[in-house]
Image (spheres, rainbow, N blue to C red):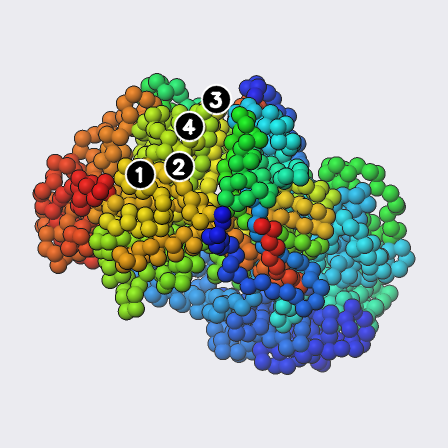
């Protein structure tokens, strides 16, 4: 029974709504469960098959139970709703069986989201990747760095929506960078609680 | 992985100030950390002191092509083998630790 | 006769219906939208723009673009003051404040102008010669003199209120320069579907087409320019960026562009940056940067009123301004005539054309039929006038001299292709006799030059070269759709011949470099003094340095040097161009990473509690760590002593979330650890922690920490805060490269778990109260035991480990539970007067206990030096083991870890002090060791320290002297065991 209160890395942040139609919406998406799924040596294909996910780099797999973002050969960041106190990780561990391991990351990662056509321009201020929609399809995943902070980037849809997953300790700092980078446009900042 | 696999050298005319990660694709050099000479191999545990001395301390300092490690630390965290020209910064080929990369003639 | 510039009755791409008010040197002027500061001042008859760098000679405008060496002004005022901006590139706005530089006290009357009377002291290398002796004068006297007399503009001492940004972009074809060649290249490449970026330094596109009246498709060229621009802007795959200068070309076709987002307005709009530095990654680059006209060398060629002929034409055509009332054209080529024709067509008189050649090529018009006198086969000797041009003395082949009255001399010594970017790619330009200029030779793969920057000057050829390069670049980038459409029709032109004229029969000072006041005589003298290499001549004379980097002076300087050496110009060669091509504000390079944004910050799981409870923070890398928690009125020493004392006497809590944490899985996980650490890991039972030490492969200690076995194939490693990232990389290397056969995987879990130490004799009591129903007795949770449990839905891991030497536990909870967990334990400790302690008290406690930390793990110490040698396994191999056995690494007299304490409890110790065995003569005797970590120990009642000392353990009990030369302190100390407090460890096992 979870009756101990949870703090979020962005608790100290003030969220604001623009006076008119925003160009950019920045969100702190809370309540997701994360784990890092890692295949044992030589078992990446077997693990991917068990989990129903792709081994291809740079492309997410979305199932009913989770979203899998490839991080490195045989490793994925698994995102779901199965419980942030280890329950999701246990489920994934069970499914992985002998083919891999899952490290609990629900609290380690913070999911920030940027939406709106001008998201490309905001991200270009830090992200060195070529995010041109002609080159980058929905589902694109990359680990990269922006504003000196490492992040996992996932293109969720064509609005576009980008999920930016950072380590919790950096979340507030990175959020401030996102807000600063959006400052020349009208921007809404919101919390989305999916817990 | 096949230790003798030859990865095709990617077109030198088309690369950027970037490194072709075998897994992630072409990425900015800022995502990588230079990790030194990739031609030295850790000797067996029971090798003599001279062998380890060579592994730890002795490096060629080639003017021209050099095979080196670039750790894709802000990306997939893989060690990438890179054949780079120390004079022109051209990159002739990249691969995984298991790959044997052809070094162009200087 | 009135002299100086004026606005023409008509013409120019300016908005004559609106006016803009601005000031220059405190005087109010008016201009029009579309004016630059240079054109507006010319229109107002201003001729004097500044004083020269060395001789303080009056200087006027020379050019019309970023080549301008003279008209450097200080822009804006207060915190937004910007020095050394080129008047030719400043778009005026209402309220613009500009002032001239290098004048003292005023521009018209300059006291330092007498410098030119002492010109012989200011020859080549004058800094080196004049300010040599005595050396004691270098800083206090000479530097101040030089800075006062010879500086350019003055920087503001206030912080820049604007912000700057970086932005990244990718394209297939990057075209630099939007003149006819660039427009054509961009259009051709864009039509193949390639992603194209077109950069233009100016606010408008068209290059030379916007500066002179050419015809394309039978209409003024501007129409074609507008049509192409419109077409490019309507294409999704094209980005046209004006006010953007390519400042550098780097390896792999990375081009850095400086976009002046808000330089043309008084204050940037809300949220807008002042400038944006673009990092552009192109598959192919096409340089279409144009050419820069070359001044000519004759006496007093720096007088205000001497201008580039193409610039004069440009002011007339683009801005509807003539720089003079009676203009003489001096040329070595046909292009100079076009300036005469432009003036004539604008209804302005031309004093004469002076052509160095005996005959011109095929000209558009016949000058003599227009009533313009042409002096053929004549060379300029000197300009006459004091503050500005009043006439020009020329000489014919028979050495007969003629003086032409005029107030402006428009000179054309030929055109230099702008090879700056080409040169930056690492290739050398080569001399081309036909155009008498350096031009690109073989390009670096992935880049090309087209048009004037490639030595192609006729419009028809520029258009076709641009189209060809654009198509080629697109094809090389993978877009090989054949370009369609014919080239626009332009009148056939013949660019004619050029006579390379360098230093003729001049009289008086002949300036090669106007910005640095370098004369032809200086270059010749430098050669005589042995500075024959062009790179040396540059440094010795300062030719081609400073803000313009010799855009108008380099080639003339090289020619003069070549003449002095008696060699061909191609044998002298050019200096290497380096980025940036134009001055860039430091703010633009810094971008967002300035002030509080210099680097990201990283907050621990307990940050909010720390803030609310008065913690003073310290930056540890990017982490914000609680350093101490002062009570009202307490200073740092009082706070840290109180905190440390309370831990020893009762109980305290310390945020240790910053320790690196790595989860390791796999059947070979234990074997992997066994190879990384010096001690044994194979037999560590599940549920137990162990302290481990890692070496680098060179045998020195790298890192330490405790690692716990949570399952048969599941370990949880901790690292020091500083090495968290490094250890993970170290593990990546060994698992991927050295032992790829090991079945082990791992990842960072640093931010999954917030951690705090609960330390002190009452810690178990607090733990028990915070976790009712959990057996935390010594039997259930012995020293180095690990327990996973949960309380009120919160997962908790308890590690019975101690850094303080007290009975202690490290509690880990998932990050988001951090504050709740902290509050829970803190409340449970209330009855024991629990306190929070910071990194300072943590340091006190660990020094008292003799635990090595960062100051001791400095990369030069071995495990044995640190007293950890016995941990090292003799039955296995591990990273660093072979090299740790080298003779020097195991030498008996290596400095090893000891404790030292002051003999007199009133003395203090300082980190970095060196240890000597005698109090006297500490200067000449060799140091026997050094002090690493010091503290005023509450437990010991005096200053104590950890130190490294030769033959350390043999010296225990002996007296040494800690010498700290920075404060001239010599303190007597006694050497002791580093385990000052509770050496047998009874407390932590209690």
Instruction: Tell me, for residue C717, which label it has, or none.
Output: 2
- Is C741 rendered above or below residue C51? above
Q: Residue at x 61, y 26 (%)?
A: A45
Give the SS element for disc 3: loop
Give the SS element for disc 4: loop
In depth, the one of C367 and B5 nearer the eye is B5
Give the SS element for disc 1: loop
Instruction: Tell me, for residue C781, which label it has, or none.
Output: 1
Q: Residue at x 28, y 37 (%)?
A: C779
Circles 2 and 4 on the same subunit = yes
Q: Mark 1 or mark 2: name the one nearer the start of the chain.
A: 2
The quarter of the rendered structure image containing the C terminus of chain C is: top left
Mark 4 crowdedness (10 Å alpha carbons): few <14, some 14-19, many ≥20: some
Disc 2: which chain?
Answer: C
Q: Mark 2 or mark 3: name the one nearer the start of the chain.
A: 2
Disc 1: which chain?
Answer: C
Spot occupied by residue C953 in the image (x, y as percentages of width and height): 15, 37
The picture quadrant where one finds residue C926 is top left
From mark 3 to mark 1, how far is it between C-alphas? 36 Å
Q: Nearer the viewer, mark 3 or mark 1?
A: 1
Question: Mark 4 — residue?
Answer: C712
From mark 4 to mark 1, how far is it between C-alphas? 19 Å
Q: Say whether residue C523 is visible.
A: no
């Amino acid at each position: 029974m979870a009756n101990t209160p949870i703090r979020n890395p962005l608790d100290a942040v003030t969220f604001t709504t623009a006076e008119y139609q925003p160009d950019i919406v920045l969100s702190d998406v809370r309540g997701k469960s994360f784990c890092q799924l890692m295949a044992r040596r030589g078992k990446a294909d077997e693990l991917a098959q068990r989990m129903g996910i792709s081994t291809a780099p740079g492309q997410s797999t979305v199932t009913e139970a989770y979203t899998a973002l490839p991080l490195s050969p045989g490793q994925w960041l698994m995102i779901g709703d199965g419980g942030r106190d280890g329950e999701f990780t246990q489920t994934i561990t069970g499914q992985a069986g002998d083919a891999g391991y899952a490290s609990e990351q629900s609290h380690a990662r913070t999911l920030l989201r940027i939406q709106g056509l001008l998201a490309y321009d905001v991200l270009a201020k830090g992200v060195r990747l070529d995010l041109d929609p002609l080159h980058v399809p929905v589902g694109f995943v990359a680990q990269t760095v922006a504003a000196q902070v490492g992040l996992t980037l996932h293109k969720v849809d064509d609005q576009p929506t980008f999920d930016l997953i950072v380590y919790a300790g950096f979340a507030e700092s990175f959020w401030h960078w996102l807000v600063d980078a959006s400052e020349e446009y009208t921007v809404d900042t919101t919390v989305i609680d999916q817990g | 992985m096949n230790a003798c696999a030859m990865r095709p050298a990617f077109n030198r005319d088309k690369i950027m100030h970037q490194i072709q990660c075998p897994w992630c694709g072409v990425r900015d050099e800022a995502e990588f950390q230079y990790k030194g000479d990739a031609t030295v191999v850790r000797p067996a545990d029971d090798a003599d002191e001279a062998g380890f001395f060579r592994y730890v301390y002795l490096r060629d300092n080639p003017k021209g092509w050099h095979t080196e490690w670039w750790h894709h630390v802000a990306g997939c965290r893989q060690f990438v083998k890179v054949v780079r020209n120390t004079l022109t910064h051209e990159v002739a080929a990249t691969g995984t630790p298991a790959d044997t990369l052809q070094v162009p003639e200087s | 006769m009135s002299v100086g510039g004026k606005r023409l009755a008509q013409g120019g791409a300016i908005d004559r219906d609106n006016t803009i008010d601005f000031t220059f040197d405190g005087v109010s002027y008016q201009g029009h939208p579309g004016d630059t500061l240079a054109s507006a001042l010319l229109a107002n008859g201003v001729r004097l723009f500044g004083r020269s760098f060395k001789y303080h000679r009056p200087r006027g405008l020379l050019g019309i673009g970023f080549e301008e060496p003279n008209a450097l002004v200080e822009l804006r005022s207060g915190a937004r003051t910007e020095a050394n901006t080129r008047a030719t590139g400043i778009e005026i706005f209402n309220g613009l404040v500009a002032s001239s530089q290098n004048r003292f006290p005023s521009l018209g009357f300059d006291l330092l102008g007498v410098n030119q009377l002492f010109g012989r002291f200011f020859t080549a290398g004058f800094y080196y010669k004049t300010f040599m002796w005595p050396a004691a004068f270098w800083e206090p006297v000479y530097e101040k003199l030089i800075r006062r007399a010879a500086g350019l503009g003055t920087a503001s001492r206030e912080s820049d209120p604007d912000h700057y940004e970086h932005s990244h972009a990718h394209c297939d074809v990057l075209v630099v320069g939007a003149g006819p060649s660039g427009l054509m290249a961009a259009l051709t490449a864009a039509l193949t579907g390639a992603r194209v970026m077109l950069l233009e330094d100016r606010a408008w596109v068209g290059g030379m087409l916007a500066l002179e009246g050419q015809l394309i498709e039978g209409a003024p060229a501007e129409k074609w320019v507008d049509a192409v621009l419109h077409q490019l802007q309507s294409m999704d795959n094209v980005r046209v960026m004006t006010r953007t200068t390519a400042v550098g070309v780097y390896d792999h076709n990375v081009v850095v562009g400086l976009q002046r987002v808000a330089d043309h307005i008084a204050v940037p709009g809300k949220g807008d940056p002042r400038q944006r530095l673009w990092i552009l990654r192109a598959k192919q680059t096409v340089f279409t940067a144009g050419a820069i006209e070359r001044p000519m060398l004759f006496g007093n060629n720096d007088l205000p009123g001497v201008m580039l002929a193409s610039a004069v034409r440009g002011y007339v055509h683009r801005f509807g301004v003539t720089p003079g009332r009676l203009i003489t054209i001096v040329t070595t080529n046909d292009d100079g005539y076009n300036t005469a024709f432009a003036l004539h067509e604008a209804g302005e008189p031309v004093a004469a054309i002076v052509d160095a050649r005996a005959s011109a090529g095929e000209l558009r018009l016949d000058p003599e039929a227009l009533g313009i006198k042409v002096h053929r086969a004549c060379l300029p000797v000197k300009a006459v006038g004091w503050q500005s041009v009043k006439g020009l003395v020329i000489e014919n082949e028979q050495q007969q001299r003629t003086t032409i009255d005029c107030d402006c001399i428009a000179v054309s010594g030929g055109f230099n292709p702008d090879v700056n970017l080409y040169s930056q790619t690492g290739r050398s330009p080569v001399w081309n006799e036909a155009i008498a200029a350096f031009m690109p030779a073989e390009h670096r793969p992935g880049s090309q030059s087209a048009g004037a920057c490639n030595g192609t000057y006729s419009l028809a050829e520029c258009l076709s070269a641009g189209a060809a390069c654009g198509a080629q670049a697109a094809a090389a980038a993978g877009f090989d759709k054949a370009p369609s459409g014919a080239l626009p029709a332009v009148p056939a032109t013949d660019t004619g011949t050029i006579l390379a004229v360098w230093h003729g029969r001049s009289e008086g000072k002949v300036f090669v470099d106007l910005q640095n006041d370098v004369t032809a005589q200086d270059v010749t003298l430098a050669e005589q003094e042995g500075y024959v290499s062009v790179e040396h001549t540059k440094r010795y004379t300062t030719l081609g340095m400073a803000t313009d980097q010799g855009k108008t002076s380099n080639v003339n300087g090289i020619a003069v040097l070549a003449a002095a050496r008696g060699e061909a110009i191609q044998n002298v060669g050019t200096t290497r161009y380096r980025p940036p091509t134009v001055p860039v504000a430091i703010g633009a390079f810094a971008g967002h990473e300035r002030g509080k944004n210099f680097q990201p910050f990283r907050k621990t799981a307990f940050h909010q509690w720390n803030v609310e409870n008065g913690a003073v923070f310290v930056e540890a890398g990017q982490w914000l760590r609680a350093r101490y928690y002062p009570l009202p009125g307490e200073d740092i020493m009082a706070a840290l002593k109180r905190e440390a004392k309370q831990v020893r006497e009762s109980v305290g809590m310390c945020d240790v979330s910053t320790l690196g944490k790595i989860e390791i899985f796999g059947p070979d996980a234990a074997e992997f650890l066994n190879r990384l650490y010096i001690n044994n890991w194979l037999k560590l039972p599940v549920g137990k922690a162990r302290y481990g030490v890692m070496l680098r492969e060179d045998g020195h200690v790298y890192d330490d920490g405790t690692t716990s076995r949570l399952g048969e194939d599941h370990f949880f490693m901790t690292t020091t805060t500083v090495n968290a990232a490094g250890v993970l990389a170290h593990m990546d290397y060994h698992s991927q490269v050295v032992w790829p056969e090991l079945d082990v995987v791992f990842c960072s879990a640093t931010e999954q778990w917030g951690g705090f130490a609960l330390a002190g004799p009452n810690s178990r009591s607090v733990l028990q109260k915070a976790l009712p129903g959990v057996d935390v007795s010594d039997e259930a949770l012995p020293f180095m035991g690990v327990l996973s449990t949960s309380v009120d839905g919160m997962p908790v891991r308890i590690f019975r480990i101690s850094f303080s030497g007290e009975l202690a536990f490290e509690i880990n909870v998932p990050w988001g539970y951090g504050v709740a967990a902290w509050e829970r334990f803190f409340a449970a400790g209330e009855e024991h007067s629990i306190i929070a302690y910071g990194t300072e008290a943590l340091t006190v406690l660990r020094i008292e206990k003799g635990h090595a930390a960062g100051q001791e793990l400095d990369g030069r110490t071995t495990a044995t030096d640190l007293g950890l040698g016995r941990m090292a396994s003799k039955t296995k191999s591990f990273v660093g083991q072979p090299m740790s056995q080298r003779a020097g690494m195991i030498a008996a007299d290596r400095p090893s870890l000891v404790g030292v304490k002051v003999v007199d409890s009133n003395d203090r110790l300082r980190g970095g002090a060196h240890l000597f065995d005698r109090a006297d003569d500490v200067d000449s005797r060799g140091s026997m060791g050094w002090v690493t970590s010091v503290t005023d120990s509450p437990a010991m009642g005096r200053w104590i320290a950890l130190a490294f000392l030769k033959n350390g353990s043999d010296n225990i009990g002996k007296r040494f002297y800690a010498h700290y030369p920075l404060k001239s302190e010599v303190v007597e100390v006694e050497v002791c065991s580093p385990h000052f407090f509770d050496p047998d460890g009874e407390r932590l096992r209690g």
